[in-house]
Amino acid sequence: MQIKHAYTVVTSPGRNFVTLKIVTDEGVYGIGDATLNGRELAVNAYLEEHVIPCLIGRDPRNIEDIWQYLYRGAYWRRGPVTMTAIAAVDMALWDIKGKLAGMPVHQLLGGRSRDGVMVYGHANGRDHGEAIEAVGRYIEMGYKAIRVQSGVPGLDKAYGVGKGDLYYEPADKGLPDEEVWDTPLYLRHTPELFRKVRDAYGYDHHLLHDGHHRMTPIEAARLGRDLEPFRLFWLEDATPAENQEAFRLIRSHTTTPLAVGEIFSSLWDCKDLIQNQLIDYIRATIVHAGGITHLRRIADFAALHQVRTGCHGATDLSPVSMAAAVNFGLWVPNFGIQEYMRHTEATDEVFPHNYRFVNGFMEMDEVPGLGVDLDETKAARYPYQRAYLPVARLRDGTVWNW
Ligand code: GCO
Ligand code: MG
C-alpha cells in the first residue's frame, strides 16, 4: 500500500482552517488539521513544498517511521510550524489506519477508558454581571465545567470576552488589532468575579480561568492565592512558560491547580514542568504538538508524575482536531478535561463529524478512523482571508503578552 497523492485545502468558513488530505493507491484517505492561527499559510507552504513530495510512495501504515522521518529528517527540529505540519500528517495517517482496520482511533490506541470526555465551555461577558449570567446559561446547557472570563472595568478590551455568546473568536481580518492591558486592574477585579459566581451558583460546577500569559510569576502567585477560596479547577497560562522554572515560584505560593501548554510544540517544552510537578494539567494538543504519536508520549510522561491532560480546543483548532482530541480523550488514562469552544454552523457543515455534546461530555460513535470528514465543495465557497490575533500594549505603550 502506498501514499498516492496528498494536498492541502485552505478554507475560511468564518475563520481560516488548513486541512491536509492523504490519499492511498487503494482509495482510502485520511485528513489532518494543519491550522496555526495567524500563520496558516506558513504551515501550508511547509506541507506543500517540503513534506508532501516526501510522502508520495511511502507505506501509510508506517506512522511511526514517517513521524521520525519528518522530525529527525528535517534536521531543524520542533517549533510550531514544523510540529503542526507533522501533526497534520500524523492525524491523517491514524485516520487511514482506523479506516483500514474498521476501528475508531480510540480503539487503536487501546480502547475506551471512559464513556465520554468531560469538556469545559466558555462563559464570558463585558462585565461581571454579564459573565455571571453567561455561567447560568452554560449550566442550563448541561456543562459540568465552565471557564469564566470578564471584561475589566477601565479597560476597553480583555482576553476571553467574545463578540457573541457561543463563539469566541479572537482573530480579526486585516492587520493585528492593538489592545491596552493593565495587570493591577485585572488582579483587583478577578477574585471578586469568582466570589460572585460562587455566591450565585454554589460549588457544584468546575470553574476555570485563563490568565493568558499576562502576569509575572509573583503576580500569578498572588492571583492563585486570592482565588483559593473559590476552588478553581485550574488557573491557566498564569505566566509565559518559555522559562519553565518560573512556575516553581507560583507553585510555592498557591494550591490553585495550574495548567499550561497550549502553545507548546513538543515534550521538551514541558519536560521540567512535568517532572518537577510544577503543573497539574498539560494543555499541549494534537495539532500543535506533533500529532497523536507525540501527544501520546507527552501524556505517558505526564502520567508518571500525576499530571493530567487538559488539551487546548479553541475555535482555531478545526473539527478534525476536535475529533482527534475526543478519540484521544476517550483512551488516555490520565485524562483531565478537554476544552470545547463551539464552531460556527458554517464550520460544522464544512467538516461533518460524529462527536456530539451530551450533558457536559463529548461522545462519539464507533465509526472507523477519526470520525470526521471534509466537504471540499463547501470548503471551496470560503476563500482564505488574512487574519491575526491582537497585540497587547501596557498603558505606556510597551508591547506585552496578548
Ligand atoms: C484558549 C486559548 C485561546 C487562544 C487561541 C489562540 O485557552 O482557548 O487561550 O483562546 O488564544 O487559541 O489561537
Ligand atoms: Mg488559553
Image (tube, rainbow, N blue to C red):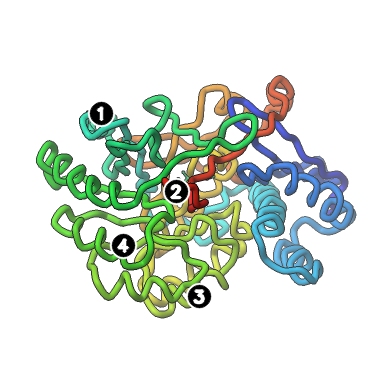
Task: Tell me the residue that label 2 is attached to.
Answer: 396
Q: Nearer the viewer, mark 4 or mark 3?
A: 4
**Position of 335 compared to 359: left or right?**
right
Secondary structure, mark 4, is helix
Q: Nearer the viewer, mark 4 or mark 1?
A: 4
Amino acid at pointer 1: Glu
Mark pair 1, 2: CA separation: 29 Å
Mark pair 2, 4: CA separation: 19 Å
**Position of 346 compared to 101: left or right?**
left
Q: Residues within 10 Å of mark 3 (few under 14, many from 20)?
A: some
| Earlier-in-chain disc, 4 versus 1 | 1
Point out which mark residue 213 bears. Answer: none
Q: Residue furthest bottom?
A: 276
Q: Give me the residue at 32% from left, 41% from top.
A: 149
| Earlier-in-chain disc, 3 versus 1 | 1
Secondary structure, mark 2, is loop
Task: Tell me the residue that label 3 is attached to.
Answer: 271
Mark pair 4, 1: CA separation: 26 Å
Q: Residues within 10 Å of mark 4 (few under 14, many from 20)?
A: some
Residue 178 horizontal/vertical position (percent)? 52, 38
State yes or no: discs 2 and 3 in contact (Cβ < 8 Å): no
Foreground residue, 326 or 345? 345
**Position of 279 compared to 83: left or right?**
left
Task: Tell me the residue that label 1 is attached to.
Answer: 130
